Amino acid sequence: MLPETVLSEHVCAAYARIRAEVGPDVTIVAATKYVALEEMAILAEAGVEVVGENRAQDLERKHAELGDAFRWHFIGHLQSNKVKVVNRICELVHSLDSESAARRLTVPALIEVNLAGEETKSGIPPERLAGLLGAYPGARGLMTMPPASADPEASRPTFRRLRELATEYGLAELSMGTSQDYRVAAEEGATLIRVGAVLFSPVRGQSPDVS
């Protein structure tokens, strides 16, 4: 196990590098699905302000320990029966894709659009966007996950299409880009990026395209 000081220094340097690359107007959301509770404080020390959790139970557990150390976002698939937890803790949901969850939400949200057309991915197809926006007119923007690829440039058409959809519907926020393609996402207009592994690799030997 790495000494905490080594890990902390690496995370601090990685976060500062990402901030310099994407600029001051992009919100960096640290994806903490694989970050243990005892390591969360390292993110705060590195200057991370916003964290994103995938599971409501992890969100609740980590928030109970860390509270206002971060601003909390929910970036995983949102089940209707978990909305109450998200409403209590989060300032933004990135992954709204159902009217049932929309009816229960009291916090702002982005609608997740499945532009890849992959059944394994969450999100609604583009042709359903107008309907969900009608049911949830308070949506702030859109989120997507492009098809998996080792080449960051392969994500560009997906990000560009999401930006076009947001413009068409007058939506300001775009959550797109993860550890392996966040630079491309920023170039295509992302206002939020979701990075995880890039903050900790290579000190953990993780591939930076994990999250």
Image (cartoon, rainbow, N blue to C red):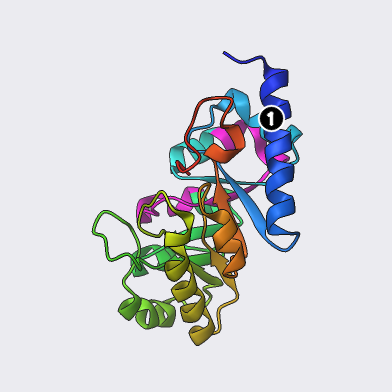
Q: Which residues are magenta?
A: 62-85
Q: Residue at x 76, y 59 (%)?
A: 24
Vertical relation: 168 (above or below) 35 = below
In the rendered image, is residue 97 in sight?
Answer: yes
| Quadrant in the picture for residue 130 | bottom left
Badge 1 crowding class, 10 Å Cα cut-off, few under 14, some 14 to 19, many 20 or more, is some
Vertical relation: 61 (above or below) 146 = above
Which of the pair 133/85 is nearer the observer?
133
* Residue picked out by circle 1: 10
Q: Amino acid at mark 1?
A: His
Q: Is residue 171 left or right of residue 128?
A: right
Seen as rendered, the residue at the extreme left is: 119
Residue 56 point in image, percent of width and height: 45, 43
Vertical relation: 89 (above or below) 186 = above
Q: Residue at x 61, y 37 (%)?
A: 199
Membership of 83 in magenta stretch: yes
